[in-house]
Image (cartoon, rainbow, N blue to C red):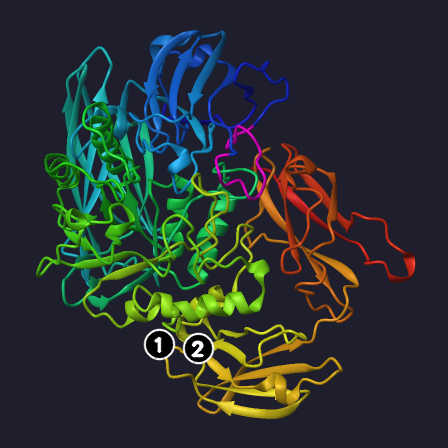
Amino acid sequence: MTRIIQNLNNDWSFQLGSEERQTKKVHLPHTVELTPAISSGCINYQGLCTYYKEMMMPLELQYKKVIIEFDGAMGVSKLYINGELVKTHYCGYTPLVQNITAYIKWGEINEIKVELDNSDNEDVPPGRPQGTLDFTYDGGLYREARLYFVEPLHITHALLANEVAGGGIFVSYKDVTHESALVNVKTHVQNETQEEKNFEIEQQIIDIRGTCISSTKSCVTLKNDKAQHFEQELKVEHPELWSPETPYLYELVTTVRCEGVVYDEITTKIGIRTFKFTYDQGIIFNGVSRRISGANYHHTHVYIGNALPESVLRRDALKLRQAGFKNIRSHYPLTPAFVDACNEYGLTLIVSAPGWQWFKEGIFAQRAQANVRDMIRWQRNNPCIIIWEPMLNESFMSEDFKQALQHIVHEEYPYEDCYTASDNGPTDIQYKEFDENMLDPEGDEYELSNKEHVPVWVREYNDRPDDWDNQSCAWRTPRGWGEEGMLRAVDRSIGLDPQCRRQNYVNMVNDDKICGYGVWPGIEHNRGYQVTPCWGGTLDLYRVPKFTYYFYQSQQDIEEAGVVLFIANYWSEISSNDVTVYSNAERVRLYHNDELVEEIGPDEVAVKHPPFTFKNVRNCYKQRERSTIRVEALVDGEVVATATRKSPGVQRKLQLEADFMDIPLRADGSDLVMVYCKVVDDAGNVVPMTADQYPIRFTVEGEGEIVGDDTIGANPIRPEGGIAGVFVRSTTKPGMIKVKAQMHWKQNASCAIKPDEIIFESFAK
């Protein structure tokens, strides 16, 4: 009799604007229209679109209640069941959820229809027209969807219950130490039967071995047509505490049982931890003072906009975590798949209300307040969340509105580990280094207040372009500009760029008065108000690392990340005279053709692990012939890692690799994997520049397809820095997929660049 969760991602019909409904089925997450990789400047679709799905509702389930949930429906969304308008939702970043029981025709085919409009709408947060927005709205049912079939006696949905600091399941913690911890669980149960019910609520905490380490039961009574909260407390002895380095997750199993029969059961992933923000000791996390390095992030990608499947979101989270970032922030609540990955990989999270340089009194303000309540009720149980950002990003808001948002957060999350962060106004944590001239040349109204004894966080640093119209700076360097541009981006981080003497990484790590800081951005992204993407970040649009990625990665200690050793020099005819190495070792040796050049210590830069710069190496050692440089990382005088660079030669062949990161491709019709094609010489070295004007054509056989074609520049495609990427999408049938790559233009056989192919498999979901 327990709840049934039915996936709704597959087999939707789709209609764009007034076009005819597509006969080809689409699967969620789905973007309304594929766009070029560089889709900045509002070239993405804005307007109406409609999704339709027909499904049988079995008679044997007619005694259950039915709840439909869409994790993200962009813009204003209208939900119809069998032709009747059931709900209109006014946020593209919080779930569209509704009880649809009254509209179901049992034993018949039912139609679900969702109409979406992602047009500019000043009354729907974020509100700002996309043409003046620093990201894009994209469109569609771009996150996952599901149906819940629940018994009349059931645990409520937190967003439908509409209970302050309640509804659903709410987990909180107190007296957390390494010796013990108390876990409080508040469960909201609704009785929609025709009679009073006596039942028990059981809570069990299960460790990763499947062992129940703590449990409790309560026998309760609930009148018919009533809902009530029930609170229970569990003690955990010697808990494994959640932290970025040890993201230990327990399962909390909540069971509603009546006369021995399970009526409802929900499993919640929880992480036991305690933290406190201070103005002089950083954040005290599980009793240890620390400062957290983070990144800002938009969950968008080439071609598909924001319709990223779970696997791609997980790879993004994992890449950012491996780079050394331990906090993520965006301008809106992120999808549950990404938040789950943060819980598992040890990425703390700032959850922000949808907003960007826009505010209006009236219905806009009301909807913005509702969004804050919804995002807390939706995501409050995730251990990765350490800050709520209720204020609208970089927006001038009335004092009453700001006070209301601050009150809402603490009303909805009335426990000690609840913190808000904001540029100004009432807040628990003060954002620092906001550039007030971005919005107003006068800027007086929006300057940092520098309140005493208030914890401080730097939400964005390292970007700071020349102005907010042209937006040029060394940090915003595409990977295709080559090694010199990427080296300058690292120089900017370590304070060597005169344009950025403050708001750089060196400033962050040497400021004892801040609790954490987030680079803007972690990954390149498209936006509305510029024809070029934001080229900043450590990963490019295709998620290929830039030199900055390896610099940030090297800032982790060996005990945590292993030995990092990267040569930031292609050793080509036009490479820098100096050879720069990023490493977390103590010393580095450089060899040229196995001849020792020099052993040096790190540069004098005020970071944990400064770069190693070998001066004037190219001028002294690089001759006409191709040669090799090799570096050795040393710790306690012992070699712990080596890396080499060989002068790139002429391009000889293509080399394919699929970017799985140990996350398999699911055969669900929407899952994706990026397949990279490297243009390499006869020794297997990437040829970084000379091959970039030659397009590569991809073909697929088996249970997969290439995302996009020549109409959006997706296939064929020119490499960037010697590497091209295509998305391969699975079908709904598990099986083998063969991807082939070859040069698009006809070649002379004697000097042809050899093609390549790769075979991999998709698996049942």
Q: Residues within 10 Å of mark 2 (few under 14, many from 20)?
A: many
Q: Nearer the viewer, residue 746 or 49?
A: 746
Disc on the earlier residue, 1 or 2: 2
The amino acid at mark 2 is Asn
Position of residue 379 measured from the top left corner of the image (x, y, whole percent): 29, 40
Q: Nearer the viewer, residue 312 or 567?
A: 567
Q: Is residue 741 visible?
A: yes
Q: Is residue 496 magenta?
A: no
Total number of numbered labels?
Answer: 2
Q: Nearer the viewer, residue 480 or 200?
A: 480
Q: Is residue 104 above or below residue 168?
A: above
- In magenta, the rendered stretch is 27-42
Q: Residue at x 78, y 69 (%)?
A: 682
> Which residue in the structure is indicated by mark 1?
608
Image quadrant where one finds the N terminus: top left
Q: Residues within 10 Å of mark 1 (few under 14, many from 20)?
A: some
Would you say the magenta stretch is mainly helix, strand or loop?
loop
Q: Is residue 113 above or below residue 548?
A: above
Q: Residue at x 76, y 48 (%)?
A: 740
- The mark found on residue 308 in the picture is none
- Residue furthest to the front in view is 441
Describe the element under mark 2 as helix, strand or loop. loop
Describe the element under mark 1 as helix, strand or loop. loop
Q: Is residue 39 magenta?
A: yes
> Which residue in the structure is indicated by mark 2?
584
Using the rendered view, name the quadrant where residue 171 is placed: top left
Whether residue 384 sits left or right of residue 304 in the image: it is left
The amino acid at mark 1 is Lys
Q: Nearer the viewer, residue 185 or 2?
A: 185
Check if mark 1's residue and mark 2's residue have beta carbons within 8 Å.
yes
